[in-house]
């Protein structure tokens, strides 16, 4: 079984290893663990191997900063099998929806996020950022595919993404990585 499919999916195109290095080293972003197949579809032994492989790949390939963090594929998790395996290997794991997160997170292996779809406007993201700030929370917007012209609901236009960042900036909120926020929240809210 191949552990990495980075840059191998043509439609929609996926980032290549060099693109990920630019995001991490040039832009200061985390490159975290993820899998195309929901972890709920693996048996116990295979799941252990997959989780070790994802984390090991990131550490081996120079993405150590994000190696302690996971995004559940399709947000699927099983509290009796997946969560214990994930919690032994990763500091945090993100769901694929559920709204704003608390600071500090109530459950670091069930981080809530905002699923930004093709129909999600930059104004809507700005309002969600303002609500999270007002409630001293944390908004983790999830952009699945950034493309010029999205054809599927999980795609988001790159220009709209840029406007979403501007709307976030207009609210006076800085963009931080999961590792930065989690490290700042250990023990107490900032």
Image (cartoon, helix red, strand yellow):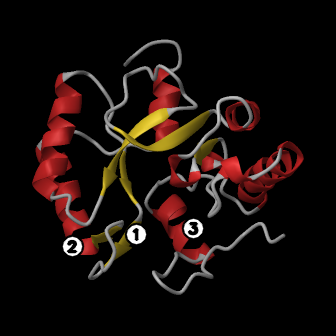
Number of numbered discs on residues = 3
Using the image as rendered, state which of residue 97 and residue 179 is in the foreground.
Answer: 97
Q: Which residue is mark 2?
A: 159
Element class at badge 2: helix
Instruction: Give x and y (percent) for residue 49.
Output: 85, 51
Q: Is residue 111 left or right of residue 157?
A: right
**Image quarter of residue 31:** bottom right
Instruction: Give x and y (percent) for residue 187.
Output: 52, 13
Looking at the rendering, in which quadrant would you find the C terminus?
top left
Instruction: Give x and y (percent) for residue 27.
Output: 43, 60
Q: Is residue 46 left or right of residue 108?
A: right
Element class at badge 1: strand
Q: Which residue is mark 1?
A: 145
Determine whether 190 is above or below 126 in the image: above
If you read the primary sequence from the N terminus, does the residue marked by circle 2 or circle 1 appear first?
A: 1
Residue drawn at 15 percent across, 35 percent down = 130
Q: Which residue is mark 3?
A: 21
Looking at the rendering, in which quadrant would you find the N terminus?
bottom right
């Amino acid at each position: 079984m191949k552990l990495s499919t980075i840059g191998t999916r043509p439609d929609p195109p996926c980032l290549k290893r060099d693109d990920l290095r630019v995001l991490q080293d040039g832009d200061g972003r985390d490159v975290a663990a993820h899998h195309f197949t929901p972890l709920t579809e693996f048996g116990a032994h295979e799941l252990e191997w997959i989780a070790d492989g994802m984390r090991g790949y990131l550490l081996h390939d120079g993405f150590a900063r994000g190696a302690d963090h996971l995004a559940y594929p399709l947000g699927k998790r099983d509290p009796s099998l997946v969560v214990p395996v994930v919690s032994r290997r990763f500091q945090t794991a993100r769901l694929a929806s559920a709204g704003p997160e608390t600071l500090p997170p109530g459950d670091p292996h069930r981080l809530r996020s905002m699923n930004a779809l093709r129909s999600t406007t930059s104004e809507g993201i700005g309002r969600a950022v303002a609500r999270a700030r007002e409630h001293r929370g944390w908004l983790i917007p999830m952009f699945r595919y950034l493309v010029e012209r999205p054809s599927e609901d999980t795609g988001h236009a790159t220009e709209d993404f840029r406007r979403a960042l501007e709307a976030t900036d207009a609210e006076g909120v800085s963009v931080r990585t999961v590792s930065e926020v989690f490290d700042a929240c250990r023990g107490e809210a900032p």
